[in-house]
Amino acid sequence: MNGSDSLIRELFGIADCDLVSTEETVENGKRSKTIYLKYCGDIPRKCSKCEGKTYSHGHRKLSIADTPKGGVPIRIVISFPRYRCSVCGNVWQPTFENVNENRMMTTRAYMDIAQRSLRSTFREVCEDYTLTHVTVKNVFEDFIRDHAQKLRFRTPAFLGIDEIKIKKIGEVTVITDLEHRTLYDMLKGRNQTTLTEYFMKMPARESVLWVCSDMYRPFEKSIGQAMPNARWVIDHFHVVMKANEAIDTIRRALQQSMSKKERINTKRGLAYTLKTRRHDLTTEEAMKIRLLRTDPALQSLAVAFDLKESFFDIWDENPTSKDNAMEAFAQWENSIPKDAQYDCFRDLAQTVHNFFEQIFNYWDCPIAITNGYTECANRLIRETNMKGRGYSFDTLRARSLFRRSNLQSILDSGGLYIGPSILAQGPLFTTEASDTESQEKDAASDAFDEGESTGEIPQN
């Protein structure tokens, strides 16, 4: 090994090459550097297939991108010989270590582009390379495809399921680990067949103990078939939200008999106040509710407000006792006035009866299970999609699931499933910044949790 070959190997990870020259150019005000190398390794004199004698078959050049140095794009051009067998015609040419010839770049550039693409748009990444944003996108998608079997999360015990509608993609089912506040997976579609097929293929599906979702009935069959040990819990925020919808129904019905001015004043003055929790009312808002009780024309809104608050109190005032919560619901249902205008609250009561077991499973769950984190993940997924001005589903899924720190941890693990055992403490993956300043900046877009502390990744 000569000095030049040793230096090239150290700087670029490419063996058997000598440095020929370097060239720096400026195009459109942007600097770039080209490094010219020449192959200096062994040349076979016999064909590897038939042992026939080989002869020179000309020279070729391989132009590849490397990671930028000091913000300057680097391109490496390697000149190498080719030899042909005089007997069978087989052509030999050298292969180069740490070079991805399919994508015409060094292996480290391939990895760098893939990891940068998790937190930056493809156009932002390509600015640091002499590449187009389409090439960067293709590299990212190739990388995710190549590592599909390694990019796995451990199956959680507490599963959250929700849907999100994304322009140009359609309905996407979002699946989270509610115990450790980690995005688990995303799949295209929401119909029962799609869900059942996915959950039946989920590794260690018997480890799922609780599933929290909205009142989408197909979940019941999918969960029942695929997760033998799981119990379905209806997210109580989806239930109590219907009490606010009932208030809106009553308010709109009252407004039908009002003049235009009265309708506008009622909507502006009460639409928000009626849906505010009693303990969150301002002095002015509390006065509005008291005035409703003395106004025969609007008194039903005060009754609706009280029904809404009593419904919320089923959860608020009975945080630990399922029996007390069931009794509180029965009392609440009996308190609904017989007048037809309150039928929307009777509809709410019927909804509870339709999902009675799944709603009251909430009190049996060992953690205060809600889909709040899943809703947060949905928001971040939307923002990720908007940032890229619309991604394909596979790209959006990869960018959402495999945050930078998560991706490196998976690769470093050698393809093992990462995360704690079922019911262990601590996050499956870090969702916040590490200690260095640059990582803190990256984490602003990396993290799904707002204000959560960093958790270490357990070693398997």
Image: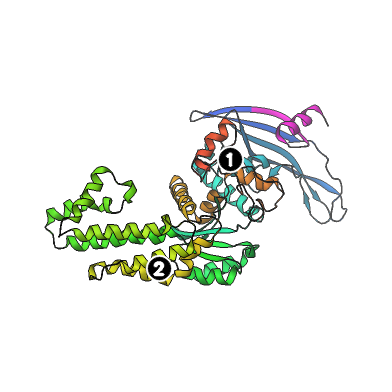
Secondary-structure class at tag 2: helix
Q: CA distance from mark 2 to mark 1?
A: 38 Å
The stretch drawn in magenta includes residue 18: yes
In the image, what residue type sits under mark 2? Val
> Is 161 placed left or right of 227 in the picture?
left
> In terms of image quadrants, where is residue 301?
bottom left
**Magenta extent:** 1-22
Residue under the image location 30 percent in, 46 percent down: 281
> Is 348 placed left or right of 60 in the picture?
left
Q: Name the residue that disc number 2 marks.
A: 352
Rendered location of residue 180, percent (x, y)? 57, 50
Rendered location of residue 184, percent (x, y)? 57, 55
The stretch drawn in magenta includes residue 107: no
Residue 419 against residue 332 in the figure, above or below: above
> In terms of image quadrants, where is residue 76?
top right
Secondary-structure class at tag 1: loop
Which mark lies nearer to you, 2 or 1? 2
Asked if the residue under mark 1 is in contact with the one under mark 2, i.e. CB atoms within 8 Å, the reply is no
Rendered location of residue 459, percent (x, y)? 71, 46
Query: Is residue 173 visible in this depiction of the protein?
Result: no
> Is 449 placed left or right of 418 in the picture?
left
Number of disc labels = 2
* Label 2 packing within 10 angstroms: few (<14), some (14-19), many (20+): some
Residue under the image location 53 percent in, 50 percent down: 400
Where's the N terminus, which quadrant?
Answer: top right
Check residue 70 in the rendering and tell me which mark sits there, or answer none: none
Please state which of residues 292 and 204 is positioned toward the viewer in this rendering.
292
Q: Name the residue that disc number 1 marks.
A: 454
In the image, what residue type sits under mark 1? Thr
* Label 1 packing within 10 angstroms: few (<14), some (14-19), many (20+): some
Please state which of residues 327 and 445 is positioned toward the viewer in this rendering.
327
